[in-house]
Image: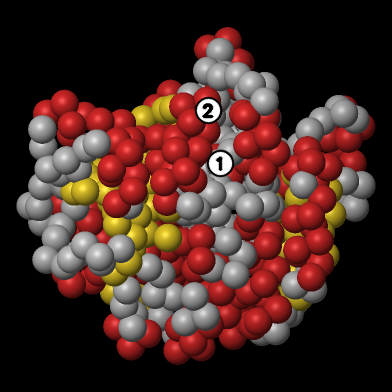
Amino acid sequence: MSPEPTKIVLSEHEMPRQWYNIQADLPTSLPPPVGMDGKPIQPEDLAAVFPMNIIEQELSTKRWITIPEPVLEILTLWRPSPLYRAKNLEKALDTPARIYYKNEGVSPAGSHKPNTAVAQAYYNREFGIKYLTTETGAGQWGCALAMSCKLIGIECKVYMVRISFDQKPLRKTMMKTWGADCIPSPGNTTEIGRKILAEQPETPGSLGIAISEAIEEAVQREDTRYSLGSVLNHVMLHQTIIGLEAKKQFEKINTYPDVVIGCAGGGSNFAGISFPFIHDKINGRDVHIIATEPEACPTLTRGPYIYDSGDVAKMTPLLAMHSLGHGFIPPAIHAGGLRYHGMAPLVSHVLQHGLIEACALPQTECYEAALLFAHTEGFIPAPETSHAIAQTIREAKQAKEERKEKVILMNWSGHGLMDLQGYDAYMSGKLENYPLPDELLQQSLGAVKNHPKP
Ligand SMILES: *Cc1c(COP(=O)(O)O)cnc(C)c1O
């Protein structure tokens, strides 16, 4: 066996005890959420949607926030997650680069999402909430929250984007197995759902629509709140355990990455791996950080930095973020988790400050990368994760050209065992690339012209 280990593991008592809040270190403070009049909204305005303990966390600028003991206890079911050296992938690429990946696919739900789902279910229960509503696209978030609510002891209802509900029936079975209710969106149990169905009976749905439905139900009931799986500050916060663990793991082998890569849908796994490294970058360290996204849903690379709403019915406040327009219905690419119109305000903000870069990738290059990964490392990645792998391969090839021994860290956000249709389509030659046409983007942005400017 080679001297360097394949997996760098931490023991449970080495697990980070605090989350890192990047809001303490930003070069300028984050523009606040506002109403349509451009005035900052008040914490109380959100009280019907989120419990107050989560709202406080959302606004906090404290650098380190203690992870509650009961949350840590549940996280030990799969954390600390292993940091792998992708030795076989390096060999196949014949690169002098060293490639490391943080395997978040080891969680019971198969992705990084339970890191925040457990924390959110916990804070809601502590606040006296009995029931959470949420949306899900491809189903990963719905599964993560369903599992977490069951472990924490509250109820969960998931509005699942209709096209995924039809294409991925087994995701619904997983949610039901964890005791949650899962219904297609748009549906006729909400006012917004009925309105959209009357206008477009054949709509495939979108995350923006499902969010509107889940919030509509939550605000009507005293014991119910809503939970969002990405985008918001507290979600980014909960995910920083990924990068904090990775830093400890690198310390064990006396290494530090030159490049950190994550795919970005709403931004949470990317924030999770990268924010602890951006902390070092703000303090003078030279590290290159890249967010990757699909060409079909190019929020960071082609969406303007604007104030936009998180959902179709504009039930959320306006957030300062890169956005393709809240009414954007993304093409049905297989990376369902990367089909959101907006991007986390914190991720958008660090891009504005030049602390990170963004790159959009075609879906066939991503599947090719996913297959090479499966052929060399064994694990089958989620279609979302393949966007991080494709960029890692680009970097490794560049290192070869430049004969540089650079160290690359990628977040391996989840496994693809529930998303094999995309692999089928790719392997039978049916997948095409779909760079978003500019007309569609301009059309969608038309709806946000009168929004206040950040
Ligand atoms: C949901 C998901 C993503 C995208 O969401 P982010 O909030 O951007 O992390 C990426 N990878 C996997 C495996 C997912 O399930």
Instruction: Say few, some or many: other residues with alpha carbon within 10 Å of mark 2 (under 14 / 14 to 19 / 20 or more).
Output: many
Q: Amino acid at mark 2?
A: Gln
Tag on residue 139?
A: none
Locate residue 240 relative to residue 316 in the image: left or right.
Answer: left
Tag on residue 363?
A: 2
**Where residue 427 sits in the image (x, y, percent)?**
62, 29
Residue at the image position 42 percent from the left and 60 percent from the top: 103
Residue 129 visible in the current orientation:
no
Quarter the C terminus occupies: top left
Residue at the image position 89 percent from the left and 41 percent from the top: 194
Tag on residue 383?
A: 1
Q: Is residue 66 above or below residue 422?
A: below
**Where residue 443 sits in the image (x, y, percent)?**
61, 16
Instruction: Say few, some or many: other residues with alpha carbon within 10 Å of mark 1 (under 14 / 14 to 19 / 20 or more).
Output: many
Q: Do the residues bearing badges 1 and 2 touch, measured as CB atoms within 8 Å?
A: yes
Q: Is residue 221 above or below residue 16?
A: above
Seen from the viewer's position, the closer of residues 76 and 101 is 101
